[in-house]
Amino acid sequence: MGRRGCRRSNLKGKLMDIITSTAIIPLLCGCVGIFGLFKLLQRIRMKAYIQDSVVVITGATSGLGKECAKVFHAAGAKLVLCGRNRERLEELVRELTTNQPKKTHKPHIVTFDLADSNTVVQAAAEILKCVGYVDILINNAGISYRGTIIDTTVDVDKMVMETNYFGPVALTKAILPSMIQKRQGHIVVISSIQGKISIPFRSAYAASKHATQAFFDCLRAEMEQYEIDVTVVSPGYIRTNLSLNAVTADGSRYGVMDKTTSEGRNAAEVAQEVLSAVGKKKKEVVVASLIPCLAVYLRTLSPRLFFKFMAGRARAERKSKAS
């Protein structure tokens, strides 16, 4: 009787193993298939959202703005490229329209200085006159800063705020009424990881990005009733000329490619992240390496430890410049 019971037990065990193994494989295949279908539908929806949409990009002459122009153009968007240098914008248009693929549109150009609020309002009117409406506004243009707080003039603080904060705010406010009228639109702002944490010798820049983060977070909540989306993109270091063109404490050009910038992410890769975030209508996306992301959580969970690290960074940077 004992041997029969043992045999039955072994038989049941083998039977369960067979059933389990044969059931798991189709289940896994089904899950993979469903996930693949979901991703495919997501890509189709994203493509449909971008294609033929009127997309305005500021700071399109170089860096991330230029790369965003390339990926949104390739996705079939109707671009309005904005910047201060018309010649460079025209050069970009020629680059985009050479060997132009099917289902793309020739971009429009609007030149203005984002730091001048009067020209920003005029530029918004020109944009609307040119294309009639705006589906997606990408506030990308900006300026960086390097210097000590004690040596930096208030005029420099104002200069950085005008370009990084008041300019995008003025343009957004000028475009918003037309979006509200249509009950459709998408506002995107390229902020920075420094809109979430502050590091030493970047006070004016970090302050402008903190203000940007706060404003567009408020805007997102207020625009929900009009079905207008708001996306804040917070990149870490990107391999562009941002540090070269940064202003210093006295307003002069910094002219140095920082090591952190030179080792940053490729601008084309970040542009793809921006395209994906817009297509998926994400409310916020952080495009940064592990350490900056951890620093954001550390600032919230253990402020004292974060402040200690930042003080240590300040000492190390002062020592490096002194040597």
Image (tube, rainbow, N blue to C red):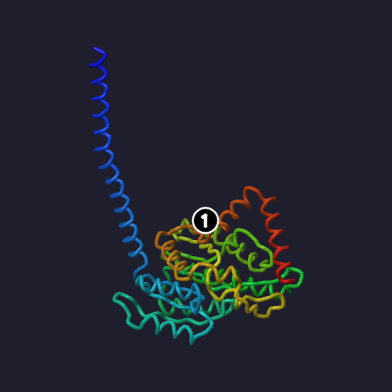
Q: Is the residue 255 above or below the residue 294 in the image?
A: below
Crowding near pointer 1: few (<14 within 10 Å), some, many (20+)? few
Q: Is residue 242 left or right of residue 308?
A: left
Q: Nearer the viewer, residue 166 or 239?
A: 239
SS label for mark 1: helix
Q: Quarter of the image containing the N terminus? A: top left
Q: Image check: 221 left or right of 29? A: right
Q: Is residue 192 left or right of residue 51?
A: right
225 up-or-down from 92: above or below: above
The C terminus appears in which quarter of the rendering?
bottom right
Quarter of the rendering containing residue 119: bottom right
Residue 17 image offset from top left, x and y in percent: 27, 32
Which amino acid, mark 1? Ala
User: Residue beneath label 1, please?
Assistant: 221
Residue 168 placement (x, y as % from top left): 55, 70
Which residue is drawn at the image coordinates 59% and 68% (left, top)?
260
Using the image as rendered, state which of residue 36 and residue 277 is in the foreground: 36
